[in-house]
Image: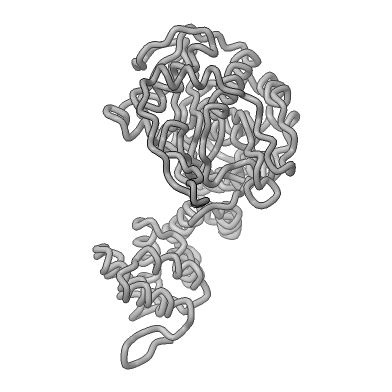
Amino acid sequence: MFSRRSRRPTSPELAAAWECLDGGDVPGALRRLRQAASAPLGEVATVVGRAAGAAGFDDLRQAATALAAHPDRVRPLHDYGYACVERGVPYLAIPALREALRLAPGSSGTLRELVSAYEDEGRHREAADVLLAHEDGLVDWPDRYLLVFNAVLAGDLELARRHHARLSGPDEDVWLGARDRQNRVLERAAIAGPVSPLDHSDLRGWQYVMGGTVLGTLSPHGYDAGMTGRYAWFQDSHDQCLQGLLRLKAVLEAAGARPASVSLLPDRGSRILGLAAAEVLGLPSEPFVPGRENTVVIAYDLDDTARAAQGPDVVRQLLHRVPGQVLHEHASCWTGPPGVAADSVTLLHQSVVPPWGETLRMGDDGEAERGEADGRPDAVIAADIVAADPTPDGGDGETPADPVEKLTDFVSAVRGTWLRGDRAGLRSPGPVTSARFL
């Protein structure tokens, strides 16, 4: 509730968010609001409206103001939820859209907006469940398609297959690409299922099902403490880069892929790693050009590629597959995935420091400090990678063994469905969850 004199909220979660706003800390207020899911919607909207005004989001400010005045009406609830999704705070949208749908259960627009908010939050089980609860009013495109989509990302392949079988052909061409991608997802699931458990800890299996990506390594740290094979913060090394390239070589051999060259992307990290890859694979290297066939395109981190000169155009070109082209990304961000899903990825991270970056080290006083970036020529650093020690990190001893033979057995089994279709980017970590920094 709010104090009449100041309009300052008195509930603990909302009061903490209000205090953040008093100090000009809008991101801090939004983090606090995550913990206020059970607070009255009108009171939450008052705090959100103040945060939106401070951020210059006038559409959200107006929608929040309207909801604060009428928290029991469908239109303000829907409009506020829509504005929250559009402004990238879907967790704030979900309670309002759920209430709007309760008051107007036949509203397909509100249902779809709620599903979108659940998807943006990675809450795919809830998205599938709310669609099932309104099954009588679903149309195939987009509703039943979205049910299949979210069932897959929730790890419920039985539900996904049942409703996929009921889908009619799209009435509009705009859905043709989505239909083809969904067909490929379920085809990959069918071929991966006999050789991979596809349970809620099978990171490699689900990365392949969702995006056609072969994951080369699992993080050997924190597997049973919430990471399940992913990294949160990771300081990379020449050794890890070489291990990733050797696993890429093994993947190519297991799949029967025979590239004729290595293509170097424009950002520095990709050039360094690409030069090393050319040595490891025994192939010539050349700058990337769109349309080149039978080549391995090497990216260190596709987000870095997108930030380079001409990088956005290059990444868009990689979405469309070229015959014989294999896209390998060494370090892929799983909390903010790139716009394309690489065919091969060494590791999944939330934040990474490349070996040539400003790495952390222990100073003479025992405190962590940042070292200087490695400014040596690309070819010199690439030579260090080739000469590194690829022995895997022993980790904490809690991660399941993952010898290269386990990887190549998987690739040999699924090779018939690899390197097919476009490389549509992943929006979700899927059924395998990992702890993350907020």
Task: Answer whether residue 145 is visible to the viewer in this image.
Answer: yes
Residue 430 vertical placement versus 308 (above, below): below
Task: Answer whether residue 140 is visible to the viewer in this image.
Answer: no
Residue 147 vertical placement versus 171 (above, below): below
**Image quadrant occupied by the N terminus:** bottom left
Indicate the quadrant where residue 429 lies.
Answer: top right
Residue 340 vertical placement versus 380 (above, below): below
Residue 61 vertical placement versus 132 (above, below): below
Q: Is residue 283 left or right of residue 5?
A: right
Q: Is residue 96 left or right of residue 122?
A: left
> Residue at left 68%, top 27%?
191
Q: Residue furthest front?
A: 364
> Residue at left 67%, top 42%?
157
The residue closer to the viewer here, 52 or 378, is 378
Instruction: Please state the horizontal and vertical placement of residue 2, each as a whole percent of the image.
Output: 39, 87
Instruction: Please state the horizontal and vertical placement of residue 365, each as a whole percent of the image.
Output: 49, 51
Instruction: Please state the horizontal and vertical placement of residue 423, each as a whole percent of the image.
Output: 47, 29
> Residue at left 50%, top 24%?
328
The residue closer to the viewer here, 189 or 15, is 15
